[in-house]
Amino acid sequence: MAYGACEDAGARFPARLTFVVGPDGLIEQSIETSDPAGQAQAILDALE
């Protein structure tokens, strides 16, 4: 349930989330993907 990965404690599967953390330690962006193969590209796109 931390960071919104699960809607509630009874959820079967958490969301596939990646967080971009800035140098100050704060989350700058949250990326949710449903396709594991596309997750790396979504991260690269976010960092451009």
Image (cartoon, helix red, strand yellow):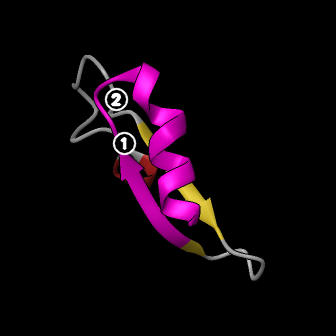
Which one is in front, 47 or 25? 47
In the rendered image, which residue does mark 2 sit on? 14
> Within the magenta stretch, is there residue 7?
no
Which one is in front, 8 or 22? 22
Residue sitting farthest toward the right? 23
Residue 14, percent across and down? 34, 29
Give the left or right position of residue 6, taking residue 21 as reference: left
- Residues packed near mark 2 inside 10 Å, few (<14), some (14 to 19) or many (20 plus): few
In the rendered image, which residue does mark 1 sit on? 5
User: Do tag 2 and tag 1 residues touch (Cβ < 8 Å)?
Assistant: yes
Please tell me which of labels 2 and 1 falls first in the chain.
1
**Residue located 39% across and 33% down the image:** 16
- Residues in magenta? 28-48
Split into 4 quadrants, where in the image is the N terminus?
Answer: top left
Split into 4 quadrants, where in the image is the C terminus?
Answer: bottom right
Question: In the structure shown, which secondary structural element does the residue marked by tag 1 occupy?
Answer: loop
Give the left or right position of residue 28, taking residue 15 as reference: right
Residue 20, percent across and down? 58, 61
Q: Spatial distance from mark 2 to mark 1, Cα to Cα?
A: 5 Å
Q: Amino acid at mark 1?
A: Ala
> Within the magenta stretch, is there residue 40?
yes
**Residue located 22% across and 25% down the image:** 10
Question: In the structure shown, which secondary structural element does the residue marked by tag 2 occupy?
Answer: loop
Is residue 7 shown above or below 10? below
